Amino acid sequence: MARRTDAGDSRRTDTRDRILSVGLRLFAEQGYANTSLREIAEELGVTKAALYFHYKTKEEIVTGILRGYIDDIDALLAETPGGPATLAEREATVRRFAELQASWGGNLTKMIRQNFTEISILPVGTEVRESHRRMIEFLAGPEPSILDQTRAVTALAAIQSAHLTATLGGTSGEADEKARRAAALTVALEVLRAGG
Amino acid sequence: MARRTDAGDSRRTDTRDRILSVGLRLFAEQGYANTSLREIAEELGVTKAALYFHYKTKEEIVTGILRGYIDDIDALLAETPGGPATLAEREATVRRFAELQASWGGNLTKMIRQNFTEISILPVGTEVRESHRRMIEFLAGPEPSILDQTRAVTALAAIQSAHLTATLGGTSGEADEKARRAAALTVALEVLRAGG
DNA sequence: GTCTATATATGGATAGAC
DNA sequence: GTCTATCCATATATAGAC
């Protein structure tokens, strides 16, 4: 994923990154509104006031987390051809998206999915929605029907559901983590191909 | 959907139902933790204290909402055959689920999806997860592979995504609401059939 | 069944010392 | 960069009158 060590962010520090990391995990596990700055501070072993030195508001923390997501999606879309996309090109993008999700470790997708309405209200939420929209539009292909759009949405949903099937098997072994990701990709491509 | 006028609930009143109705809408639009009892009370034109006459806690409100969901899913599963299910039987269940979702109007699914972790923590959350698990297990068919499980999860996700495709087309006309539901069902069945 | 008033806790955020 | 102490808004929930 996009490193926050990029030249674009001149204020990089270890603590800044650790705040984002802990925040991401707690927001995914408990929800954004349901996670207090006190909890994040305690996990880091500091006080709330220390957090406020690095980020002016709670919203800035979640915004910082989502910037990485948006940047990754946009970079992925930047690699795609400009004109009408062939099925092969759209399949390649789905594969790349699956790789991205694997690199995020699940928490990022989980957080966005489970706080989507709350995130949508934030200024950065508009950017997230916009990235999603462009992604879906590309996957749906040129002049898509409603059916094509539904297939594109469902293909992405399949990828995102990769970690959800874990709880079903009971045996949530770390070994078949790879198998679940592979299955998710297979299903996503099946869905996309059904549209031709 | 299961009426809260069932004999099982002897404390039915108009206000009780209206609280659940308004609560559902706000929880879906803003999130559970992000919606205060004051907001719900204001929309109903009463005070917070009035709410507490009908429900002892905020959790009881969301629990009341989810009971309807659980009852509907369980009733749907009760109609299914006990033994190993054929593809046709699983397809029929997907259709019935799509009908259920249409009758809920979208808000119920939206609320659960977007507050899943928070709900999971609640006692009633265990029941919701359990209903979901049984639903997936049935749709995945007998002795399912990981691929079968993924297809079952994705089929349900397709149905649930029905209203999400609205924002894409730009023209969120009320007319093609039906078309989107039909498309979602088509894709869901495609996914299920891919597994045979 | 609904109200006013209030108890009590916790949240985000800031001031100022070190 | 991190701390203690504190402000202030809002949350859930209750007491008691009507």
Image (cartoon, coloured by chain):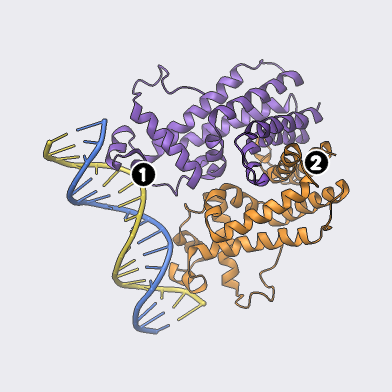
Chain colours: A orange, B purple, C blue, D yellow
B142 or A142: nearer the eye? A142
Q: Which mark is residue B37?
A: 1
| Residue B112 in view, yes or no | yes
Q: Is residue B94 found left or right of A27 in the rendered image?
A: right
Q: Nearer the viewer, residue C17 or A138?
A: A138
Q: Residues within 10 Å of mark 1 (few under 14, many from 20)?
A: some
Q: Is residue A149 above or below residue C18?
A: above
Judging by the rendered image, the residue that carries numbered circle 2 is A192
Q: Nearer the viewer, residue A169 or C16?
A: C16
Q: Position of residue B95 (x, y in %)?
A: 67, 24
Q: Are marks 1 and 2 in contact (CB under 8 Å)?
A: no
Cα distance, mark 1 to mark 2? 43 Å
Secondary structure under the numbered disc 2 in the rendered image: helix
Q: Residue flagged by tag 1: what amino acid is it?
A: Leu
Q: Chain of mark 1?
A: B
**Which x, y percent locates residue C6?**
19, 51
> Would you identify the image quadrant in which residue D6 lies?
bottom left
List x then y, in percent, for residue A130.
65, 55
Residue B10 figure quarter: top left
| Left or right of residue B30, residue A81 in this image | right
The structure residue drawn at horizontal position 67% and vertical position 28%, both measured from the top left corner, is B137
Q: Taking the image as drawn, is residue B152 in sight?
A: no
Q: Is residue B121 above or below residue A70?
A: above
Assign the C terminus of chain A to one quadrant of the image: top right
Residue drawn at 84 percent across, 51 percent down: A85
Callout 2: 10 Å neighbours few (<14), some, many (20+)? many
At label 2, the amino acid type is Leu
Residue A160 rendering spot, x and y as whole percentages: 69, 46
Q: In the picture provided, is A33 more to the left or to the right than D16?
A: right
Residue A64, picture quadrant = bottom right
